[in-house]
Amino acid sequence: MRQIDLSRTLPQARIPELPNPYFGKVRDCYDLPDGTRLLISSDRISAFDQILAVIPWKGQVLTQLARYWFDHTGDIAANHVLGYPDPNVVHCKRVTILPVEIVVRGYLAGTTSTSILTRYKAGARTMYGHTLPDGLRDNEALPQAIITPTSKAFDGGHDEPLTAAEIVGTGLLTQKQWDEVSQKALALFARGQRMAADRGLILVDTKYEFGTDTEGNVLLADEIHTPDSSRYWIADGYEEAFAAGTRPPSFDKDVIRSWVVARCDPYKDPIPEIPAEMIEQTARVYIDAYERITGQPFTPDASGETPLARVRANLARFFSPS
């Protein structure tokens, strides 16, 4: 079994020599003078609008998985990537993120307050502008994939459910922008589901973020089809779990989310400290996800005295002159 060094993590990438910082939930970002941007994926894991833990190798896995998917979907949607100067870093075009998070769902699943399963079990049948039939069971395939958009909470607040009519009617997006991102999102999801099925996986749902560049072009940004942005199930365990009414086997961050939900109300109560064995298990889940999705072994870059020292060295060429 692969050894996981719990001390070798990238909890943050605060690099004072880089200009114009912005620190998100899991990424530390810098806007460069030439109009481009550095996105550094830390090993932080977030859910319920807060940071839960730091997971070894998670940032590398997410960056390299997103790279795999960006490379395999460029014919569907142009993206923001310019290069990868470090295994945890994307050098990309600076885009203005559209204020709508595009979530595509193929199954009645989820644990968060905005998930369709949570709302369905509470009695809702019309949500996000879609009407679902009565009689659906937990984790059942929907009649067709649907988009369940939410407002983009830039200030750390809660994402709020939206409908297509609300998005266009309130001016969050133009009709042209909504038509473009919704069409591309459904096409990306269909591609993702087909490729996942070839690997014995089910792509259950995912979120996409789009932005506009200085010319107004809509580009796919952030990440795509990673375990942080998507829910995957293991296909050969799905039917048995569905028949039994249990959660299908997965390798997404529901592993930690489910552990937390079983112990508290994460939106009201303090989050219990995540034990070391759960952190190690989650690291293995992310690595397994990379290998199952791509069909390639995960070979981490363990160079440098620390992960942060390696990132700093690889980004030195972007440092502002003193």
Image (spheres, rainbow, N blue to C red):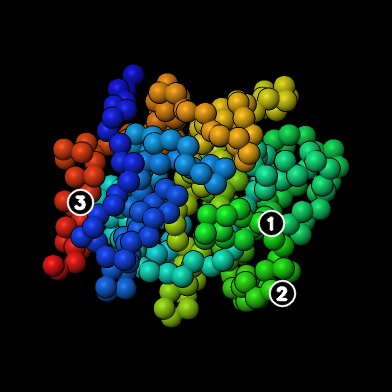
Q: Which residue is mark 2?
A: 169
| Snapshot quadrant of residue 204 | top right
Instruction: Name the residue rendered at 61%, 53% in the picture.
Output: 158
Tag 1: Cα neighbours inside 10 Å, few (<14), some, or many (≥20)?
some
Above/below status of 261 relative to 79: above
Query: Which residue occupies the foreground of this view, 275 or 183?
Result: 275
| Snapshot quadrant of residue 112 | top right
Q: Position of residue 20 (x, y in %)?
A: 31, 66
Q: Earlier in the sequence, mark 2 or mark 3?
A: 2
Instruction: Name the residue rendered at 20%, 56% in the picture.
Output: 315
Q: Secondary structure at mark 2?
A: helix
> Tag on residue 161?
1
> Tag on residue 312?
3
Query: Which residue occupies the foreground of this view, 82 or 54?
Result: 54
| Snapshot quadrant of residue 181 | bottom right
Instruction: Name the residue rendered at 64%, 34% in the picture.
Output: 265
